[in-house]
Image: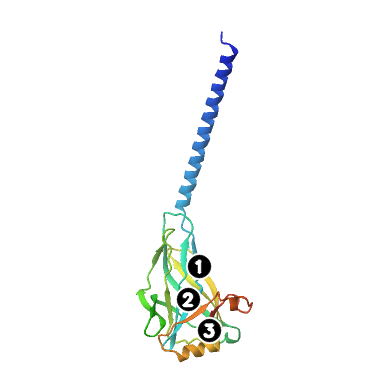
């Protein structure tokens, strides 16, 4: 006949085995749930973000205007798929007192890369690629410098509301981000007096402008 100590020891072993099996089962279920969650996340289409740059480059182009814009296109979520950006569009329209003036019709002409021209002591843009679809994934964000052109519209003083729109493959909704641009007469005169290859910077983060509600983080010429 077993004494009390052996009975207690047997009970503890039974209790320990039960707890061990329960813990192992719980851990396995948690691992399975995590695996299913990760699998589900990987099956989802990438969710893209478009972040506007602080700098917009504008220059004359004969009778028209060039605008260089370099947004960041990225996704923060894991996915087995990649997103294809099929096209890029830039639209701006005058508002306020200038709302009745002609609206420009920009098209994506090419992609560019900035470089410093030591002879002219200015920033220049050189061709780096044709307008073509590009891929975006979590480990491959993109920062293309789009060159948009209107062949017959010249920038005039005033306030403009605009957006950049990125088309996506298939029937997915395009990505779009809004912005505003304020062009002073001083900036227009400066560009008109420069050469046809001049590039002029407009920023939306200059403290002297962001502190004023009038500008509301619009792109404004640096020298205004």
- Residue 51, label in figure: 1
Nearer to us in this view, 180 or 13: 13
Label 2 to label 1: alpha-carbon separation: 15 Å
**Residue plotted at (60% across, 13% down):** 4
* SS at mark 3 in the image: loop
**Farthest right residue?**
213
Residue 143 in the image: state x and y as whole percent. 43, 68
Q: Compared with residue 170, is residue 7 higher up or lower down, i.e. above or below?
A: above
Q: Compared with residue 2, is residue 191 higher up or lower down, i.e. above or below?
A: below
Q: Earlier in the sequence, mark 2 or mark 1?
A: 1
Residue at image mark 3: 223
* SS at mark 2 in the image: strand
Residue at image mark 2: 90
Q: Nearer the viewer, mark 3 or mark 1?
A: 3
* SS at mark 1 in the image: strand
Q: Which of the 4 image quarters holds residue 131?
A: bottom left
Mark 1 neighbour density, 10 Å: few (under 14) some (14–19) many (20 or more) = some
Q: Quadrant of the N terminus?
A: top right
Mark 3 neighbour density, 10 Å: few (under 14) some (14–19) many (20 or more) = few
Q: Is residue 33 visible?
A: yes
Does the residue at mark 2 contact the one at mark 3 (Cβ under 8 Å)? no
**Residue plotted at (53% across, 33% down):** 23
Q: Earlier in the sequence, mark 3 or mark 1?
A: 1
Q: Which of the 4 image quarters holds residue 125?
A: bottom left
């Amino acid at each position: 006949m077993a004494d009390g100590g052996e009975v207690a020891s047997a009970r503890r072993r039974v209790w320990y085995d039960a707890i061990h099996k329960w813990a192992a089962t719980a851990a396995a279920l948690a691992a399975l749930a995590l695996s299913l969650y990760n699998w589900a996340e990987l099956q989802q289409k990438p969710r893209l973000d478009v972040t506007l740059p602080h700098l917009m480059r504008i220059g004359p182009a004969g009778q028209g205007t060039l605008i260089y814009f370099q947004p960041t296109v990225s996704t923060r979520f894991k996915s087995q798929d990649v997103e294809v950006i099929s096209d890029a569009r830039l639209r701006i329209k005058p508002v306020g007192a200038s709302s009745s003036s002609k609206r420009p019709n920009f098209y994506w002409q090419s992609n560019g890369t900035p470089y410093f021209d030591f002879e002219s002591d200015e920033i220049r843009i050189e061709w780096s690629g044709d307008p073509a679809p590009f891929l975006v994934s979590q480990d491959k964000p993109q920062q293309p410098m789009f060159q948009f052109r209107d062949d017959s519209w010249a920038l005039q003083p005033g306030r403009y509301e605009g957006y950049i729109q990125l088309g996506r493959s298939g029937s997915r909704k395009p990505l779009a981000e809004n912005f505003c641009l304020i062009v002073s007469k001083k900036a227009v005169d400066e560009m008109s007096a420069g050469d046809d290859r001049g590039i002029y910077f407009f920023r939306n983060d200059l403290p002297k402008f962001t502190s004023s509600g009038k500008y509301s983080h619009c792109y404004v010429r640096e020298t205004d």
